[in-house]
Image (cartoon, rainbow, N blue to C red):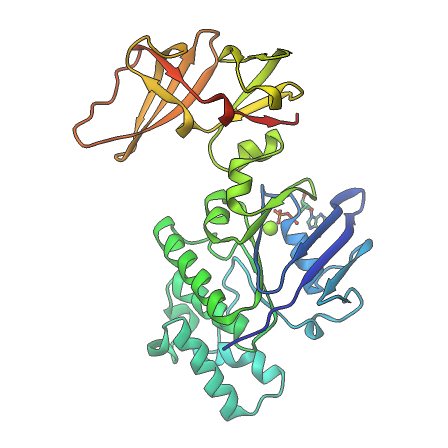
């Protein structure tokens, strides 16, 4: 199975439900064959954006284009889009292979060819042995693999997935994340994937768009969103982070919550309201030799690492993650310690 994938453009899309604005100035370009993720909390407008693209919901204004062609007035079935939802949404009275062949039957593909193509899709998701099972005889993971096969069997140029792994347990979710990525590479279609799980978004995406209140706050590759969040919201939503208020600034130094006066390469922080720093970039010193004094307020053992909460001199709690070697003890709470960080690792944030 293969597909060339299409480009997708949302241009200033607005969607309201009565007085409630679900999408506002929603703009996004998705490249051909790209895996794009919409990441946002529940209610941020992710499903509304997918529904607008698929044609399940009408937009108030703006335009949506597939391969440069406006589709807002095109009926759903003409948009050449495959969809996978969180609920498995398989037809309960059709067996696995007839679930998968359904989109082909709808498109008038001859029976023998529909059968052949459905079997190929079933092979891709490695469920060949279950072709004659009914949906209620499948596990959650198997149902979602069937739903995926059905969504791609007609080789759509665009595949939309709305929290497809949301109902599965963690281990299975991680397995299926890798599978989905692998299938998409094989097929080549353009994907828009929706999740509220930042870990999933970082794992799967070529790029991700962080959404809040119907708008895109920041869009970029996972590394860029992780390393260079622009706002406090993105810094806190993507990965664990420390957010420190900038309490004052003068040329050559800034006053930061938790750190006190910091000097050196601080030019990027002068105009910021907040600075962020990742827990793994804080180095704990077991003596008083570090630049910043603190006490240990909390220690959580993760096996390969320990997450410490440090209480700084001003009372601010700072989280630090320390990789751990076998036999290394977890520091007892209350231990006076100190810590260091590289000023260049402090990221300037807008409010
Ligand atoms: P998400 O998928 O990010 O959780 P949705 O796109 O489903 O968010 O919803 C965005 C907002 O729009 C929510 O606050 C939701 O309550 C509202 N909403 C969605 N669909 C409707 C509808 N049919 N009528 C009224 N409000 C809706
Ligand atoms: Mg949703």
Horizontal and vertical percent position of residue 186: 46, 70
Q: Residue at x 45, y 50 (%)?
A: 203
Whether residue 210 is visible to the viewer of this picture, yes or no, is no
Front residue of 137/287: it is 287
Q: Which residue is at the far left?
A: 327
Q: Residue at x 77, y 52 (%)?
A: 13
Horizontal and vertical percent position of residue 268: 61, 24
Front residue of 157/101: it is 157
**How many labels were placed on the picture?**
0
Quadrant (top left, top right, bottom left, bottom right) of the C terminus: top right
Q: Splitting the image into 4 quarters, where does residue 40 fall?
A: top right
Q: Splitting the image into 4 quarters, where does residue 6 fall?
A: bottom right
Q: Splitting the image into 4 quarters, where does residue 160 fall?
A: bottom right
On screen, residue 295 above or below 324:
above
Q: Residue at x 54, y 20 (%)?
A: 265
Q: Is residue 347 left or right of residue 60?
A: left
Front residue of 254/114: it is 254
On screen, residue 25 above or below 96:
above
Horizontal and vertical percent position of residue 130: 35, 76
Horizontal and vertical percent position of residue 5: 60, 69
Q: Residue at x 42, y 76 (%)?
A: 122
Whether residue 297 is visible to the viewer of this picture, yes or no, is yes
């Amino acid at each position: 199975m293969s597909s060339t994938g299409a480009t997708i453009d949302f241009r200033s899309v607005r969607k309201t439900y009565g007085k409630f604005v679900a999408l506002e100035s929603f703009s996004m370009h998705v490249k051909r064959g790209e895996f794009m993720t919409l990441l946002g909390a529940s209610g941020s407008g992710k499903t509304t954006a997918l529904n607008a693209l698929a044609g399940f919901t009408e937009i108030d204004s703006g335009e949506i284009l597939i391969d440069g062609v406006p589709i807002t007035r095109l009926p759903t079935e003409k948009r050449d889009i495959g969809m996978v939802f969180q609920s498995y949404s398989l037809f309960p009275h059709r067996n696995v292979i007839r679930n998968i062949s359904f989109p082909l039957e709808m498109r008038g593909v001859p029976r023998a060819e529909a059968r052949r193509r459905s079997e190929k899709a079933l092979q891709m998701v490695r469920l060949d042995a279950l072709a004659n099972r009914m949906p209620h005889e499948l596990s959650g993971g198997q149902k979602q693999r069937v739903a995926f096969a059905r969504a791609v069997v007609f080789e759509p140029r665009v595949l939309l997935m709305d929290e497809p792994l949301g109902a599965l347990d963690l281990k299975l979710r991680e397995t299926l994340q890798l599978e989905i990525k692998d299938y998409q590479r094989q097929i080549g279609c353009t994907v828009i994937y929706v999740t509220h799980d930042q870990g999933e978004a970082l794992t799967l995406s070529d790029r991700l768009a962080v959404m809040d209140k119907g708008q895109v706050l920041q869009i970029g590759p996972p590394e860029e969103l992780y390393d260079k969040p622009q706002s406090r919201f993105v810094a806190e939503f993507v990965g664990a982070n420390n957010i420190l208020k900038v309490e004052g600034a003068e040329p050559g130094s800034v006053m930061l919550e938790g750190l006190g006066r910091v000097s050196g390469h601080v030019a990027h922080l002068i105009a910021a309201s907040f600075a962020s720093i990742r827990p793994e970039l804080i180095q704990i010193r077991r003596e008083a030799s570090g630049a910043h004094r603190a006490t240990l307020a909390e220690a959580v053992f993760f096996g390969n690492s320990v997450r410490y909460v440090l209480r700084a001199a001003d009372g601010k709690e700072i989280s630090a993650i320390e990789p751990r070697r076998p036999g290394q003890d977890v520091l007892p709470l209350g231990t006076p310690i100190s810590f260091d960080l590289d000023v260049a690792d402090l990221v300037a944030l807008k409010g």
